[in-house]
Image (cartoon, coloured by chain):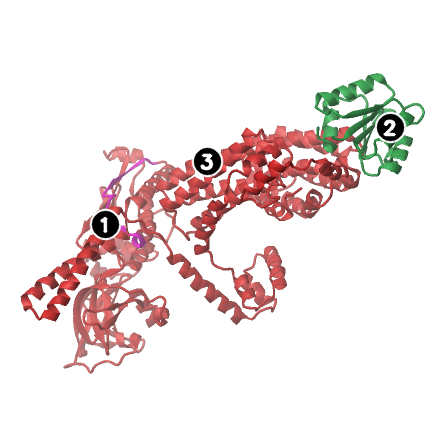
């Protein structure tokens, strides 16, 4: 079974996302605490990941740049951006780099799963 | 997405056809559409404000569409629109993938906006249907050809290969590889389908039970046809190919029944029941596996539908005939690509295929005519394969009696060889006669059905008509068990229905009027059948206001059907005969039930085709009574044999009024031309030489006398001159349909006489037409 890859610097958000996924029987999850960490882990697991979920504002490398880097390694796997109302412009840039779509924080776990389900089944 | 686009377009078309049904508009106007409108409008506004990449909003859109679908499922007659919404729901999933997002968004905005207009009454169903149809190809492409994002592809790669054990298990089944691959991975949708299909099966089941008693009821047939049609349509969408194929074969069968090509016999009903049982088993397999496609597949492969479908196909093959286009293509008159092109055009223009071919100058009119002829002979052949049920008892008697026939034959042969006495032979021949008669009666009775079949339908007619007019009527039936030739039964239904509707409408008075007259509030109509002589008599009698002979006579005089001075001496029986003339109606007012003009003349015409007669009697204020006299069977008639020229011709006996020997001096020529007439019993009657129609040479008149038969056809009298009168006899009619003589409309058949000579049975209507 392939992994769902979560990159977010906030412990709380990471926890919520991971717990929600586990609640819906998504067991294989990889996490990263910032952009650089994420890129390294992605490089190590290329081909084993079914879905990326990136926060936009992260230390060491922001989510938008991370999209740009990841797309150099993996051009097909969907990338979901987690963002806030204020980052609309960044979103457009991320889309240009190849992000699939974005979710505005805060979100309900149920809706988040409905989105994930579009790309990966548990 | 294994559902092929053909299934898609076929089913989408039916779903759209439903929207454009005008009655849907009516339903939409009447029902409480507020919840639907608000759901659609929410979906619409979400779509309008959607920004690309907004995954949350995409979810909201899907939720909104799902609400729309649920509301539609709650609305009667709009379930079909729910199917469409189901497609939109799936299309909305494509919003979550960048490569299909734009297409999906534009499509959804367009259709959902139109849908809102439709529900707000700003757009007709027809316009809405057309708008959806114009987007059909995009929707189709989206759902079937576009790879939904790239993740899906990878995910499919990731699906673990089935283990070896599973492989072996599937290889044993009758289903080809990949048969179930198209099943959608949406348990909710599958569950919804399950409930829908169950409902339809339930309705089909109760309809089928009713059909057992009323096998030709069009409405019931339509209902059950729709049931399977819907199941077929929805299952095709969901990739449930086994359900689709099964319901398709049932639907095909029911089409033939509905179009009257096959009679829905008890055997066929059993077959349909069996098919429904199979469907139910498959559906249960879905539920047990909690609508999870993978486990559903495992239970599906255990239920083999192919023996059943094969059986259905073999049955259908007997009844199918080819389409004009197919015939033309087979003969190389048009090419396959032309055919497809033309079929496309035909859909747009609604013209007949033959017309189109000639218009487009692809084939000549002669070719089309040729093909039409071919089709017709096929149709004729197809229609002949009907099934008749014969009771065991009758069959056993028949076998017994045939056994005796064999014994009798060997005894006769023995006598011929040994040269035995004449008395022994006579005894054996008497026995042979007895055997033949028994076989004749037995075989004829096998083609008989009890008249109850149509009496029961007439009860419904009476009740419905009475309800329409706000009257209450009781239909009393007697002699329902009387048996009649199947063909006769089919022909008398319409006349009987007409008379009964007339009786309810014109005969039976409204309740208050009846009470004033001291009659029972509830009107009574008696419907009775009984054997009389060599035929059957059907009596329809109502206890209504009756028909006033004086009034009838006045109308007849006004129309110039009879002279005033003759009217006085006319017997009452003949007065009522005027009722059967075209356009003769004494009704003061026209109601929706009986209409105007068309009436009892049609009754008479229908009965004429089966050698039946109808008479009316009435007592004003008390009753009107119709008596219909029918031959037991169409295969044997009472005929009057004559000779014209060198051939024998048989005239139907019941049409002959009298035998008239005409003195040549009696004949005079009518003023307007060459027509010969005689003056007989106060009437001018045209004299017709049968030779003219049959193209025979007449004998020289003997001592200036001509032998003639006086006929009454459609209330007119004719004298038909023949050369010799041979006598009355029971005639076995042989069909001429497939012979060179099939074009001779004035023969209803041929016959072979005891001495081996042949004769022709004259159809009086055709005979008169040939004269004109």
Up the image or down, B372 lies above or below B250; here it is: below
State the SS at label 1: helix
For this orientation, the residue located farthest to the top is A12
Q: Chain of mark 1?
A: B
Q: Which mark is residue A26?
A: none
Q: Is residue A104 left or right of residue B319?
A: right
Residue picked out by circle 2 = A41
Chain B painted colour:
red
The colour applied to the residues of chain A in this rendering is: green
Residue A29 pos. (x, y %): 78, 25
Percent of width and height locating residue B2: 65, 43
| Residue at disc 2, secondary structure | helix
Determine the secondary structure under disc 3. helix
* Magenta run includes residue B479: yes
Q: Chain of mark 3?
A: B
Q: Are marks 3 and 1 in contact (CB under 8 Å)?
A: no
Q: Which mark is residue B203?
A: 3
């Amino acid at each position: 079974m392939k992994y769902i890859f979560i990159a977010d610097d906030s412990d709380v958000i990471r926890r919520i996302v991971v717990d929600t996924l586990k609640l819906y029987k998504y067991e294989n999850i990889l996490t990263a605490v910032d952009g650089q960490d994420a890129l390294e882990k992605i490089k190590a697991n290329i081909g084993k990941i079914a879905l990326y979920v990136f926060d936009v504002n992260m230390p060491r490398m922001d989510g938008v740049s991370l999209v740009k880097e990841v797309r150099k390694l993996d051009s097909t796997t969907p990338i979901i951006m987690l963002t806030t109302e204020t980052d609309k412009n960044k979103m457009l840039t991320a889309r240009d780099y190849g992000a699939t779509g974005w979710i505005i924080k805060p979100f309900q776990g149920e809706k988040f799963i409905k989105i994930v389900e579009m790309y990966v089944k548990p | 997405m294994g559902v092929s686009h053909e299934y898609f377009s076929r089913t989408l078309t039916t779903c759209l056809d439903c929207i454009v049904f005008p009655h849907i508009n009516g339903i939409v106007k009447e029902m409480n559409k507020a919840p639907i409108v608000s759901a659609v409008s929410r979906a619409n506004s979400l779509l309008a404000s959607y920004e690309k990449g907004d995954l949350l909003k995409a979810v909201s859109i899907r939720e909104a569409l799902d609400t729309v679908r649920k509301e539609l499922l709650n609305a009667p007659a709009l379930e079909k629109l729910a199917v469409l919404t189901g497609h939109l729901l799936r299309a909305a999933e494509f919003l979550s993938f960048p490569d299909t997002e734009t297409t999906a968004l534009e499509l959804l905005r367009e259709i959902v906006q139109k849908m809102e207009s439709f529900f707000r009454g700003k757009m007709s169903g027809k316009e809405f249907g057309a708008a959806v149809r114009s987007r059909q190809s995009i929707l189709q492409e989206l759902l079937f050809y576009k790879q939904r994002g790239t993740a899906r592809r990878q995910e499919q790669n990731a699906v673990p290969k089935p283990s070896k054990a599973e492989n072996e298990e599937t290889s044993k089944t009758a289903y080809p590889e990949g048969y179930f691959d198209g099943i959608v991975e949406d348990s909710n949708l599958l569950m919804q389908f399950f409930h829908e299909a169950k409902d339809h099966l339930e309705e089909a089941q109760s309809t089928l039970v009713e059909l057992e008693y009323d096998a030709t009821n069009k409405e019931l047939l339509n209902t059950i046809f729709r049931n399977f049609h819907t199941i077929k349509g929805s299952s095709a969408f969901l990739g449930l190919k086994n359900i689709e194929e099964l319901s398709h074969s049932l639907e095909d069968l029911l089409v033939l029944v509905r179009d009257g090509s096959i009679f829905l016999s008890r055997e066929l009903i059993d077959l349909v029941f069996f098919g429904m049982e199979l469907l139910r088993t498959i559906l249960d397999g879905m539920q047990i596996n909690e609508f999870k496609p993978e486990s559903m597949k495992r239970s599906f492969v255990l239920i083999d539908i192919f023996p059943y479908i094969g059986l259905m196909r073999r049955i259908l093959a007997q009844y199918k005939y080819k389409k004009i286009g197919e015939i033309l293509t087979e003969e190389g008159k048009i090419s396959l690509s032309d055919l497809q092109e033309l079929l496309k055009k035909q859909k747009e223009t609604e013209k007949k295929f033959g017309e189109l071919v000639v218009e487009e100058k692809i084939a000549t009119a002669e070719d089309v005519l040729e093909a039409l002829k071919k089709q017709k002979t096929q149709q004729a052949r197809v229609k002949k394969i009907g099934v008749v049920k014969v009771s065991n008892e009758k069959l056993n008697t028949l076998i017994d009696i045939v056994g005796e026939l064999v014994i009798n034959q060997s005894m006769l042969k023995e006598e011929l060889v040994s040269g035995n006495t004449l008395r022994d032979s006579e005894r054996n021949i008497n026995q042979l006669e007895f055997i033949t008669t028994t076989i004749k009666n037995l075989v004829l009775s096998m083609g008989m059905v009890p008249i109850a079949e149509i009496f029961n339908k007439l009860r419904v007619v009476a009740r419905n008509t009475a309800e329409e007019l706000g009257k209450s009527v009781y239909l009393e039936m007697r002699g329902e068990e009387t048996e009649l030739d199947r063909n006769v039964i089919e022909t008398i239904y319409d006349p009987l229905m007409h008379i009964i509707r007339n009786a309810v409408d014109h005969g039976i008075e409204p309740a208050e009027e009846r009470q004033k007259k001291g009659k029972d509030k509830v009107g009574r109509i008696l419907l009775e059948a009984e054997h009389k002589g060599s035929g059957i008599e059907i009596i329809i009698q109502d206890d209504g206001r009756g028909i006033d002979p004086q009034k009838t006579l006045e109308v007849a005089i006004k129309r110039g059907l009879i002279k005033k001075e003759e009217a006085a001496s006319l017997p009452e029986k003949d007065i009522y005969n005027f009722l059967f003339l075209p356009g003769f109606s004494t009704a003061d007012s026209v109601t929706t039930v009986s209409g105007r003009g068309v009436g009892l003349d049609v009754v008479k015409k229908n009965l004429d085709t089966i050698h039946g007669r109808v008479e009316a009697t009435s007592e004003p204020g008390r009753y009107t009574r119709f008596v219909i006299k029918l031959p037991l069977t169409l295969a044997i008639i009472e005929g009057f044999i004559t000779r014209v020229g060198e051939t024998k011709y048989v005239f139907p006996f019941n049409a002959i009024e009298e035998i008239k020997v005409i003195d040549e001096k009696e004949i005079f020529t009518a003023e307007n031309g060459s027509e010969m007439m005689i003056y007989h019993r106060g009437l001018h009657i045209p004299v017709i030489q049968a030779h003219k129609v049959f193209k025979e040479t007449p004998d020289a008149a003997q001592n200036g006398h001509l032998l003639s038969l006086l006929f009454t056809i459609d209330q007119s009298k004719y004298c038909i001159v023949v050369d010799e009168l041979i006598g009355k006899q029971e005639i076995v009619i042989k069909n001429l349909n497939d012979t060179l003589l099939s074009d001779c409309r004035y023969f209803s058949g041929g016959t072979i006489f005891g001495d081996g000579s042949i004769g022709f049975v004259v159809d009086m209507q055709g005979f008169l037409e040939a004269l004109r």
